[in-house]
Image: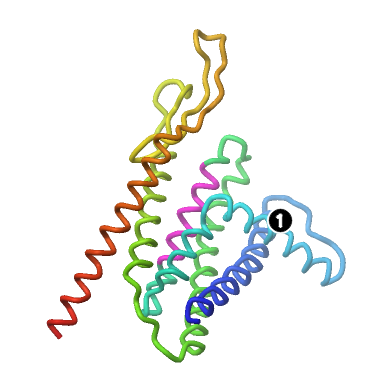
Amino acid sequence: MVTVKRIVVWLLERLLEACILGGLFMYLCVRTGADLPRGTFTSLWNEVWVFGAVVAFLLFVHGYYITTAIFGVLWRSPRLWVYPTITVALFALHTHIIFLRGKPDLTHEARAMEPPFIGCGALIVFACSCIGGEALKKWTTVRPRENPYLSATGLTLLSFLLLNVANYLRPVVGDLSFRTYGLPFTFYRDGGYVREWVWRDGVLVWTGLIADIAVVVAVIALASIVSKRIRVARQVRQ
């Protein structure tokens, strides 16, 4: 039941967050020279939702909702300031990745939107997460028991995700042909030209993907065992 409540609160946090971020995004677009939406309050509200949907879609495809779900649903600290702080850091990281990936195609005005969007957006995300935390605290009458398996799963998946994001954003050295992605094992290889005229498409390296999944499962199992033994040792000392 506690997990269901966490999911509901997490969804409401993201919904409120998307709406306010949509308004912020629309305001920044107007400042860069876009036309103000004209009409009634209803039409203006619809425009805010459109911009909010755009922001939500970009954050979704770049993994923001997956990482926030890990800390908002699977592993949520009882300390109210921890989850909002983590969420702000994730928002700043994923938003920077979005601007970084789109930088070659963005205008100077669009690139200039990054600092104010991340700065103001971080305050919005922090406020929404704090509101959600307070609501969850009042809604949950029984303190949830920490599950070492869920905690190990969440932290392991987040670690591997950040590791592979860093690998994806590594500096380009030489030609992009046949550039590999994936840590600890390569699971995808970009396409490229062979002998400067024969093109080969990018391929999914199944052996590397299976090996990565096996490593993740092994790390989760090991971390769960270690976490459980640490908890038992603490209980014995108390």
Magenta-drawn stretch contains 47: no
On screen, residue 101 versus residue 37, left or right, reads: left
Task: State left or right for residue 225 relative to residue 140.
Answer: left
- Per the image, label 1 sits on a secondary structure element best described as helix
Residue closest to the eye, 36 or 13 = 13
What residue is shown at x 69% (from left), y 59% (from top)? 53
Q: Decide: is 162 above or below 1.
A: above
Q: Quadrant of residue 13?
A: bottom right
Residue farthest along the left direction in this orientation: 237
Q: Which residue is rendered at x = 63% and y = 69% of the image?
A: 15
Of the pair 22 and 75, the residue shown nearer to us: 75
Residue type (three-letter) at the residue carrying disc 1: Val
- Quarter occupied by the C terminus: bottom left
Q: Quadrant of residue 149?
A: bottom left
**Camera-side residue of 104 and 186:** 186
User: Closer to the camera, 161 or 122?
Assistant: 161
Is 87 a magenta residue?
A: yes
Whole-percent x, y for residue 93 in the image: 45, 54
User: Which portion, as a residue range, is magenta?
Assistant: 86-100
Q: Which residue is mark 1?
A: 30
- Percent x, y for residue 7? 54, 73
Which secondary structure class fits the magenta region best? helix
* Residue 78 to residue 208: above or below: below
Sort mark 1 into few (<14), some (14-19) or many (20+) by Cα contacts within 10 Å.
few
Residue sitting farthest toward the right:
39
**Residue 181 position within the rendered picture, expressed as x and y whole percent measured from the top left:** 43, 35
Residue pictured at 50% horizontal, 82% vertical: 1
Its colouring scheme is rainbow
Task: Please tell me how many numbered marks the rendered image carries.
Answer: 1
Left or right of 45, for residue 31 = left
Report the residue at 46% width, 33% height from top. 188
Image location (x, y in percent) of residue 52? 67, 61
